[in-house]
Image: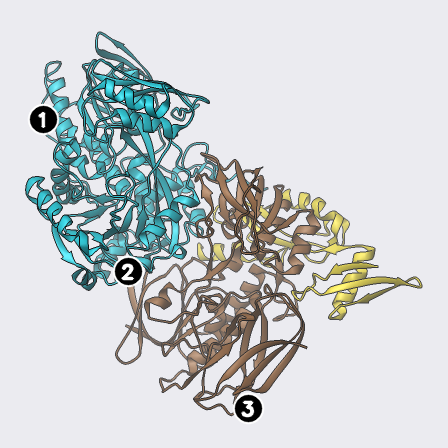
Chain colours: A brown, B cyan, C yellow
Amino acid sequence: MKQYDVIVIGGGPAGIAAAVSANDENSKVLLIEREARLGGILKQCIHDGFGLIRFGEQLSGPEYAERYIKELNKRDIDVLTLSFVTKISKTKENLFYVHIVNKKGVDTFLTKALVLAMGCRERTSKQISIHGTRPSGVFTAGTAQHYTNLLGELPTKECVILGSGDIGLIMARRLTLEGARVIGVFEAKNTPSGLTRNIHQCLYDYNIPLHLSYTVTRIFGEDRLTAVEIMKVDENLKPIKNTEQIIKCDALILSVGLIPENEVAESLGVQLDNRTNGPVCDGQYMTLIDGVFSCGNALHVNDLVDYVSENAEQAGKNAARYVNSDRCLININSSDDFLYTVPQKLDINQNNSNVIVYFRSRKNREKTKFVISVDGKEFFSKKYSFLRPPEMERVEVDFNSFNLTKSSNIEFNLVNF
Amino acid sequence: MNVLKTNKKLQKEFNGKVYAAIEDGCIILRGELSEWNDVVRACQIAATKYSKCHVVNDIKTSPPLFSVAKKYSFFDNSLDGRTPDVLIIGGGISGASIARELSKWDIDILLVEKEADLALHASGRNDGEVHPGIDLGKGSLKHKYIRKGNKLYSKICSELNVEFHRFGQYACFCNSWAKPLVWFYCLHRKYIDGIEDTKIISGQELRKVEKNLSPNIKFAIYNPSAGCVCPYSLTIAYAENAVMNGAEVSLNTSVLDMEVDNGQIYKVFTNRGVIYPKIVINSAGVFAEDVAKMAKDRFFSIHPRRGTNSILDKKAGKKMTAIASVKDLSIHGKSHSKGGGILHTVHDNLLIGPDAVETYEKENTATCRESIETVFSKQKMTMPSLSERDIITYFTGTRAATFEEDFIIEYGRKTKNLIHCAGIQSPGLTTAPAVALDIEKMAINLLSPIKEVKRNKEFNPIRKGIPSLRKMSPKERSEIIATNPDYGVIVCRCEEISKGEILDALHSPICVPTIDGIKKRVRPGMGRCQGGFCMPLVSKIIAEEMKIPLKDVKKSSEYANITFGCTK
Amino acid sequence: MKELVCIVCPRSCKMKIEFQHGEIVVSGNGCKRGKSFAINETTQPKRTLCSTVKTNYKEVPVLPVRVSGEIPKDKIFDVMKQISTVVVTEPISCGDIIIEDVLSLGVNVIATSSILKEIIKENG
C-alpha cells in the first residue's frame, strides 16, 4: 500500500494550491480528483475576474486554473484523476486509509494528514420548496453553465433566473450574449446576493431587470417548462398571498446558494459549523479530527478564488507540518452581527502569529469596526467603510501577541464608528 | 343495496341534485354538482365498502371537471395489424407483473404503455412499502392477496434481482388507554384475519431498536414481515423479465378506442396502428374506467386520490431503519388519509408520506407545499427530529381508487375476452405478485378454448439486473472493473454511479435513453444534488452511445428537450 | 453629477462623477483604477468580453476565449457575431490568437485554455 504524508481530496483551485504548498514543505503528496481534468468548476467559469489579487490580472477561470496546474506539474506530486474517493477511515495510529475507485479498480492509500478540498454544490429547487410539475428546463446556474460553456449547448431561449448569487448573474450575461432572453432575475431577499459589480456588469449593462423580494413558487409544464409563478415575499421571505404572477418562459435557472460538500468529512466524524456548513476548524484550518484539514469552498463559501487559493496554501502547508500532538482548543465567539467567521477555534499550542480570519457581515453596514477582544479587552481592530454580506472579508491576525491561555475568552464583534 | 335509502341520504345532502339508480348490477349516480369533493362524497354515500356492486359516477359538473389521458401527437404504424394473444393495457406494476407471469406460456404477449417509460404513474409514485396487511380484515380482495403477495416478495425479488428488505413496520400509539383495544384488534387480525406476524411491543422496546422515535409513543403494533422495495425498479424488472421471455413491451403507445361486437373486443386502435388481440387485460390504473368504457364494460368508477411523498437525504436515513407512523386515534377509520408514515428506503433515504387528497385530475402529479407541510407536521409526532431541511425531493402520484375501495380482479361482465385488473391502490404493490399469478390463470382459462396453450419451455425466471458497484466488496468491484474499466468511472457522485452502469442501462432489455429513463434504472441524479453535477455528463453519454446530437437527448417525453442546440 | 459603481474589482466602490470647470472629478473611488474606469464610463464605456468558439474536436466542442483588451461596450454583440463564425481546427494553446485585431478594434480574440493541446497530447 502506498503511503503519503498528505493526501489532498479534490483537484479544483483549493486542492491544487494545497497540494503545491504541502509539496513545498517537502512532504510526499497525493492529489485525488474525480473528474478527468484538474481545475474543478473553474473549467466552466470562462468569464474573467479571477486572479486580481493573486496575479494582479483579470484572468478567466480556465486561465487561472492552468497557471496553478503548471505549478503543480513542475513538482513531484502524485496526481490521480478520474478517481473517486469512496471511503476514508482512521487507523489506531491516527493515520488515514483513503479508499478510491478508478478505471484500474479499487485501491487504498495511507496518509498522515488529509486535506479536504471538495468544493461546494448548488442548492436545488426542491431545497427551496418550489412546487408544481417536473418538466425539463429547471437548471441550477452551474448546470446551465456546464451545458453552455463546456458542451456548447444552449439550455434556454427565454428564462427566468431565481436568486442573485454570482453564478446566476454571470449566467444571465452569458446566456444573453449567446442570444437567449433573460426575462429577469428574481431575488427573495431585499438585497442582492451577488457582488455589486456583477449586478452592474452582468445585469444593468444588458438591461436585465433585478426584482428584489420576489420568489418563484411554482413550475408549469408537462414536458418542457412553459411558465413559472412568481410571488412577492414578506420580510421573513414568506410568499404574500394574492401576489401571484405567471411568467411564460422555457427555463428556470437557480442561483440560490452553495453548500460546502462535506459528506466525506462527516463520515469521519468531522464536526460542522451550521453557519458555514463547513467544518469547525482552528487557526491552521485543521478540523476537530486531528490530521484532517479543510480549505476552499468546502470550508466555507468564498467570494473570490484568490482567497480559496490562499486559504488552501495555508491548509496544505499546515497539513505537511502536522505532527500528532495534544491540542488545546479555545473557542472564538463571534456575535450575531456576523453571518459567519472562520476559524471557529484556536489551538493555543500552535503558532498563531499569522492566522487569516474570514468573515461576512449579516447585514449591509457602513463605517464598521471589526474588533477582536480577549476577556473583554480590545486587542485588534480594523475599520471598514462598508460591509456587505455577499463580500467576504479577510484579515490577518497575530493571535500570539494576545497571550492566550486555555481560559481566554476570545470575542469577534462588529461595532459602528 | 337499498337504493331508496341511498336516494334519501343523497336528497338530504344534495337537495335532489343527485340521484342513484340500479342498472345492470351497478349503482349509477346521475345529476349535477359544482364541486368535485361533492361528487366524491355523493358516490361514497352510495357505495358499500368492498361490494361487487359498484358505483358508476355519471354526475355532471358545472363547470365540467374531467380529465382525459394525455394525447401524443406522433402516429406510426409500428403495431398495425399485430394479433397478440394477450394485449395488456398499462405498464404499471400490475401490467408488468402480469406480462411476466404470462410469459411462462408460449403465447404472444403485447404490453402497451402510453408513457415514455414504465411505472410513470402510481407504480412509480408511491412509498414502496410491502405491507403486512395489519389494517385489512377479511372480505376484501385486498385482504385476499395481501399475505400471499407479501410472502412472495422474497422469492420474486431474488428472481428478478431487485433489492428488497423486510425492515418491519411499527404502528405507534401515544395513548396508553388504547392498549386493551389495540390488543383485541391485534388478536383479531392475527388469528381471524391471518396477519400472523402481528405483535405488540412497548415504547421502551421500540426505542431500544429505533432510538429516534418519539418518547411519547407508549406502545406499537409490530409486523416484522413489512418491507420496502423500489417500486419502479420492480416494475421495470418484471417487464424486462417478460421481454427476456418473449413478451413485447411497446412504450409511447396510447389506446385510443376499441371496436366491440357481440361481447368481444375485435380491434384496439392505438397511435401506432390497429391491434387485433385475442384477449385484453385492463391494467390501466387511473384510466382503467376509460379502458372499460371503450371495451363497453364499464361497471365501476375511479376517483383519483393524490398522495405526496418526500425523500430525505441519506444522512437522515441513519435516523431509522424501519417503517413507522403514529396512529392518530381521533381520525382513525374516518379518513383514507393515513397521514402517511416514515419509511427507510432500500436506497437508505427516508421517505415521508403520503397524504391523500381527492382530485378529478388523473394525471396531475404537480406537488404543492401544503401536502408536504401536512405530512411533516403529522410525522414529527412519530419522529420529533424530522426536518424539512433534509428534503432532497418530493413527488406526487394518484391512486386509482374505486368508491368501494377495493380491487377489481375479474372477467369482463359484458365483454367476454377481457380481464380487469382495476382499482389497484395501496396495497397494490404488495399484492401485485399474487394478483399476477391469479390473472395468469384467468387469462389462460380464457385463451385455452381459442387456442392450444403450451408452456414456454425457454422460460427463465431469473433476471440479472445491472450490477450495483457501490454495494460490492472491494474485491468484487476490482474484478468487474477489470472486465470493463467504465465501471470505475464515477459519473454521479451522490449515488456513486459509474459510466459502466449507465451504459448497461442503455443496453438493457427495455432501453429508455432519456435522463429520467437512466435515472430510474441506475439512479444518477437521485441523490442530494438532484443531477446538478451529473445531468450534463449523462446527457453526453446518452448522445454518444445512441449516436444522436445532444439537443435530441430528452429528460422524459419526446417534447422534454433539455437544450436547444449549439450556441454557435 | 453622476453616480456609478466601479466594476474593476469586487470591492464595487460607489463613485461620484462631477464636472467642475470642464474637468471630470471622481470621488468615492478606492484606487486609481477606479478613477480611470469612471472617466472612461463618461467618455467611452469599455468592457471585456468572454465567450467560446466552436471546435471540430468531439471531446471539446467549444473552447473558451476572451478579448485581449477591453472593447467599446456598444461593440460587444458585433464581436460576438465574429466569434460565432470561427471554428478552431488546430490544437491551440492558452493565449493563442483566434481572431486578430477583431473588427479593427485593436484587440485580439485569444484562447483562454490549453485543453485542446492537452487532449491531443494524451490521446497521442
Kindly identify the amino acid type of the residue bearing the numbered disc 2.
Lys
Residue B212: % across, % down: 27, 61
Question: For residue B429, what is the image quadrant?
Answer: top left
In contact (CB < 8 Å): disc 3 and disc 2: no
| Crowding at mark 1 (Cα within 10 Å: few <14, some 14-19, many 20+) | few
Residue B34: % across, % down: 43, 24
Residue B270 in view here: no
Kindly identify the amino acid type of the residue bearing the numbered disc 1.
Arg
**Circle 3 chain:** A
Task: Assign a secondary structure to mark 2.
Answer: loop
Compared to residue A232, the image places residue B321 above or below, namely below
Residue B95: % across, % down: 24, 30
**Circle 1 chain:** B
Residue C77 in view here: yes
- In terms of sequence position, does the residue under pointer 2 or pointer 1 come before the other? 2
On residue A166, the disc is: none
Mark 2 lies on residue: B318
Residue B266: % across, % down: 25, 11
Kindly identify the amino acid type of the residue bearing the numbered disc 3.
Ser
**Circle 2 chain:** B
Question: For residue C66, what is the image quadrant?
Answer: bottom right
Question: For residue B138, what is the image quadrant?
Answer: top left
On residue B455, the disc is: 1
In contact (CB < 8 Å): disc 2 and disc 1: no
Quadrant containing the N terminus of chain B is top left
